[in-house]
Image: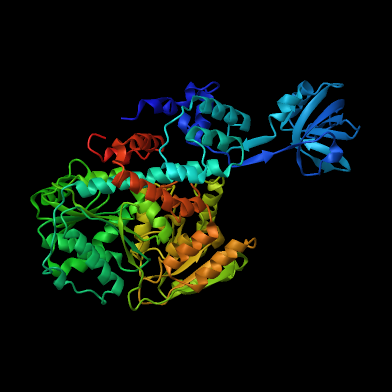
Amino acid sequence: MRPDELNPLFAETDGLDGVGPKLKKPLEKLGLTRVRDLLYHLPERFVVRRAVHDLDEAQVGEQVVVALTVTEHRASRSQRGPYRVLASDAKGNVCALTYFGRASYTAKKQLPVGEKRWVAGRLDQYDQMLQIVHPDHVSETSDGAMGKMVEPIYRLSEGLTQPRVASLVEQSLARAPELPEWIEPTTFDREGWPAWRDALVLAHRGENAKARDRLAYDELFANALALMLVRQSNKARKGQALQGDGHLRDKLQLPFPLTGAQVRSNAEIAGDMAQASPMLRLLQGDVGAGKTVVALEAMLVAVEAGAQAALLAPTELLARQHFETLRKLAAPTGVETALLTGRDKGKARESILMGLLDGSIDIVVGTHAIFQQSVSYKNLGLVVIDEQHRFGVSQRLMLTQKGKVTPHTLAMTATPIPRSLVLAQYGEMEVSRLDELPPGRQAIDTRVLPLDRLDDIVAAVGRHLETGQQAYWVCPMVRDSENMDDDLAAAEARYAALRERFGDDVVLVHGQLAPELKDSGMARFAAGEAKVLVATTVIEVGVDVPNATLMVIEQAERFGLAQLHQLRGRVGRGSEKSTCLLLRGNELSETGKQRLALMRETQDGFRLAEEDLALRGGGELLGTRQSGDEAFNIASLEQITRLLPVANADAKLLVEQEGGLESERGKAARLVLYLLERDWGVQTLRGG
């Protein structure tokens, strides 16, 4: 249960003054539905103004507050022209206060001729005359203006204004209670951080590094603590020790010998599964490093020991692909595998459910359908989760409750994550890394070309298709962006242009399509019926078409390094030589140049992930925003790298030496888990 003192913070925003049905919509669009959401809707930047006695003291381009006396109103002859209010300062310098459109009505009211007003805004120059266009504030007293010397600028959505958001934030701050301190006292004193409520007030009122750091630390601490509680409760749970005798694994006929990294990972996983406490391990593999083979070996350990294994994939397409791969690889062992997705109905579904219940099915592959209530297992011993970051912790917990005792869990991700961030996202897990590529994999020829050579590139695609091979063409699709529709239009326009040239051989796939259409487009391409797949980044993970040996990425500078690497990894999956063309726009930033140069230079995903972190410094966490699962809303990448080790050590101290959530500090820490919505950490404890 959420502690009572937090209830005012979880009240709906429509309880605040001025919030009616009309304002609710734009607030919802920003995710601001409760008082706590407004508290954590921190300013993106601040406008800092300087009070000047007269305009001679100010620079053009500077934000100022100055007292002006109104001398004249001038309307433009055309309706679209500006409305100017002329005013003079203490020395007689003339300045035009310029308004456009309906704002002129406000000017007439606020600025009567002969009256003195304090004006705040940016000083500009037009045709030798000083001017302030659309002043930010006009006040009758100096006190009113001086309160605007530092002004927060918030992210808005249509229908919201800065003053309105600022007013809602002020009301929310007034409702924020003083809370007991959850940060370890020596850390708190050493850093010189403000208390929680003071930090929020300071962060909304000005550039305050200590306040921002404290709030970021809270988020990292809550995350680390929740992950640690999950891990602790996992260790305390009863699992089953699964020790295989190797009789199934010996029958595998793999097309190539295992790499050293695969052998090492297999040993780590088998070692964990032989213990009674349930395994919680992350398998990080670079694109094409052979995660599936390692997962299959782990599943065979479970089957050898008399248990069942389940593989959970994020999409139906991926589930089908995994099923086909595993079925082929496992064929010599005689193990019974099945596929279960939301689409399976009637008798087919019934027979799979019966097989899982009576134990005749050893391995099941599927989407989240495999942990619905109607699905029961005879003895589920191992759960493998592909693309771990696409599933919330609550879904993972549901799956682990499917066994008679807690099954072992192996999570896999194809996104190489820098060591400094593994802790942040997967703090509760042991990690195995596949950092070698299987023998026989050819390097992908990566080239950077300007977009204005498009005709040559399309001609080259034509020549490529004539050899009987296939190609991907990826257009940028930056989610959460204002110009999402433009991006979609660009992908559709590219599809239309390529269709004119190549006819029905071209298919289009993007995230806004209905799932059936998306799946059927992908399926046509996978079956070789379509030759060119035009797509947004939905193909980033997992689509496996060995005959596709050309990847064209348009406006490559708009992608992060990790993402470009994921996309490039869709080719180079067969024995043929593969090529990746990175098309760049003309406006290339320094970071963009470095990013594209690195892509040419290396195919080591782990190195690219580290470089991406260094280059980016902020922005989304290596491709996780693509999956709609952003781990941190407050902490920037720089803060994560700097503060996470301290937060992790603090959480560990609380759990292992200070009595966890039952101690005095633990009770305060329970508040931060609820406040920052990491309460799944609390729920893993008995009685929540």
Q: Is residue 72 left or right of residue 384?
A: right
Q: How is the image coloured?
A: rainbow
> The C terminus is located in which quarter?
top left
In front of the other: 352 or 448: 448
- Residue drawn at x 9%, y 58% is 306
Q: Give 391 or 587, whichever is nearer the viewer.
A: 391
Taking 513 as reference, is 685 above or below it? Answer: above
Question: Left or right: where does residue 260 sit relative to residue 209?
Answer: left
Q: In the picture, residue 107 is in which quadrant?
A: top right
Q: Tell me if residue 233 comes above or below residue 250 in the rendering.
A: above
Residue 674: x %, y % from top left: 37, 35
Residue at the extreme bottom: 440
The N terminus - image quarter: top left
Q: Position of residue 558 (x, y in %)?
A: 55, 58
**Residue 148, quarter of picture:** top right
Instruction: Work out whether residue 13 or residue 432 is closer to the camera in this orientation and state it.
Output: 432
Picture residue at 40% right of the left edge, 73% below the top: 468
Horizontally, residue 617 falls left or right of residue 162, namely left
Q: Look at the picture and state if 512 lies above or below 566.
A: above
Residue reaching furthest right?
A: 92
Visible residue check, residue 102? no
* Residue 301 in view: yes
In the foreground, 339 or 264: 264
Q: Position of residue 521 (x, y in %)?
A: 38, 56
Q: Position of residue 640 (x, y in %)?
A: 46, 51
